[in-house]
Image (cartoon, rainbow, N blue to C red):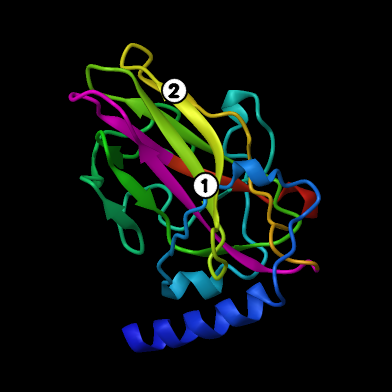
Amino acid sequence: MKHMVATAAVTLTAALVGAAPAMAEDTDASEFTGETATAQFTPQTVETCTDPSVAPLLSTQKDDDLYFVAPGGDFEQGADGWTLEGGAQITFGSSAFAPLGSGQRSLQLPAGATATSPAFCVDERYPHFRIAGGNLGVNKAKIRVSVVYPGLTKNVRHAEDLDVDHKDDWKLSKKIKVQPNYGRKVGGWRLVALRFEVEDAKDGVDARVDDILVDPKMRY
């Protein structure tokens, strides 16, 4: 199975990345960190290259856009396909917004932790995503949210910083741009991954990410 996934990953990356990169007009070069990150490929990676099933998952939060859950983005089935570093792990404690019903787990990010999602497909019709961020510890933290473009070099775009305070429990991020056209001249399916980091935080930080919701609203 691992060999089949790896072979599919190479084929899919070559097909989706396409020609040499050219900076999209709406992309600010200063957003890129200079890092090159990779993302795991899972059997679900290929499956995401079709129009997703969507629902108004945030309607109770006055957001009627139609969303789907990024692969593994509710964390209820563990960390399959995720790359977890620096103490990041899946543990108990779930978003108070519960867009998917009652959940029990979330992504835990102590100080110095990094987590990168599995690769999944988007196209030019995917404008943004939202996440639930929380802090179940005793000190404030900042979650650095980035978009990774597999197959390209220097492919980490710093998209947003989400401040989380233990006094506020959970909060819903604003709409964070996917910018799916970075690094290509034509549209169509391409791979991205999402990366979450906590840097320069004090001991006792227990930052959390849950319910990663992606909006392909421009197709509807």
Image spot of residue 10 (x, y percent): 50, 83
The residue most toward the top is 167
**Number of numbered labels in the structure image:** 2
Density class for disc 2 (Cα within 10 Å; few <14, some 14-19, many ≥20) is some
Residue drawn at (18%, 24%) of the image: 204
Labels 1 and 2 touching (C-beta < 8 A): no
For label 2, the residue is: 163
Q: Which residues are magenta?
A: 186-210
Inspect the magenta stretch and tell me whether residue 92 lies in it: no
- Can you say whether 56 is above or below 7 in the image? above
Image spot of residue 126 (x, y percent): 70, 52
Label 2, secondary structure: give it.
Answer: strand
Q: Is residue 100 visible?
A: no
**Image mark for residue 171:** none
Density class for disc 1 (Cα within 10 Å; few <14, some 14-19, many ≥20) is few
Q: Is residue 23 visible?
A: yes
For label 1, the residue is: 33
Label 1, secondary structure: give it.
Answer: loop
